[in-house]
Image (cartoon, helix red, strand yellow):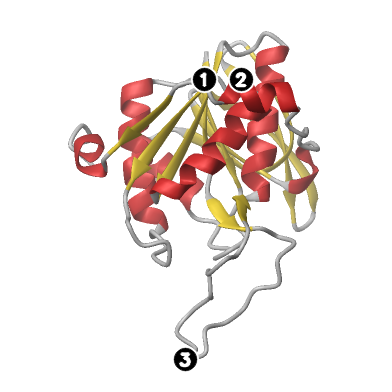
Amino acid sequence: MKVLVPVKRVIDYNVKVRVKADGSGVDLANVKMSMNPFDEIAIEEAIRLKEAGKAEEVIAVSIGVKQAQETLRTALAMGADRAILVVASDDVQHDIEPLAVAKILKAVIDQEQPGLVLCGKQAIDNDMNATGQMLAALLGWGQATFASDLTVEGDHATVTREVDGGLQTIKVKMPAIVTVDLRLNEPRYASLPNIMKAKKKPLDEKPPPSMASTSPRA
C-alpha cells in the first residue's frame, strides 16, 4: 500500500509574524519557512505505518512555489521514499485556495493510486481546515478527520477522532482520507545521515496543467 501525504510550506511556528507597512499582507522577506506542523505529524504517522509493515511506500506531495522543495526534502529526510512538487505559483505571497489544492491532489492521487492519504487537519497560516474534506468529496472516498489514533488492519482503518464531546472511534474502508490532529504522535528529528540521503531521493517537479488534465472532475 502506498501512503500519500500532502505537505505545505508555511512560516515557521516559532517566528513572530510581521505585517507589511501598507497592511496588504504578511512580510515574508528573510522569514524562516518550514513544514506545516500538522503535516509533520502526518509524515511521521505514514513512516510509522511503513515501519510496522502496513505500507510499502510513503510519498510526500507539495503544491505551491519552487521553494517548497526544501519542505519536501525535510519530509524525505524524515523517512519518506519520494516526493512530488506541483509548481502552481511563482509568487510566494500567493496562497492557493483549498479547492484548487484538492483538485490538483486528486489528479496526483489518480496517477499514484495510494491506499491511504494522510493530511494535516489544517495549515497554521490560514487555518482553513478544508482541503482534506474537499479531497474526500472529489474522490468519493471515506474520510476520518481530527485523528488522535490510527490503526490499519487489512482494507480498513480504525480512527479515534477528537470531537467537542471527547473522543469518537470510527472505522473507514480504504482507500480513505485521514486528517491528523496534534496528539497523534510526536514527529522525529531528521538525522544528519538521513538529511544527506534525502538529497539523492527522487523529487519530481510537475506543472499543474498536466496534472489537472488527468482528472475529469478537476
Q: Earlier in the sequence, mark 3 or mark 2?
A: 3
In this figure, which residue is indicated by the disc labeled 1? 200
Contact, mark 3 vs mark 2 (Cβ under 8 Å): no
Identify the residue at horizontal 65%, vertical 73% (top origin): 17
Q: Position of residue 36 (x, y in %)?
A: 62, 50
Q: CA distance from mark 3 to mark 2?
A: 43 Å
Identify the residue at horizontal 68%, vertical 23% (top origin): 194
Q: Is residue 132 visible?
A: yes
Contact, mark 1 vs mark 2 (Cβ under 8 Å): yes
In this figure, which residue is indicated by the disc labeled 3? 22
Q: CA distance from mark 3 to mark 1?
A: 43 Å
Between disc 3 and disc 2, the foreground one is 2
Instruction: Tell me the kind of residue under disc 1.
Output: Lys
Q: Is residue 83 left or right of residue 80?
A: left
In this figure, which residue is indicated by the disc labeled 2? 197
Instruction: Tell me the kind of residue under disc 2.
Output: Lys
Q: Position of residue 174 (x, y in %)?
A: 52, 22
Query: SS at mark 1?
Result: loop
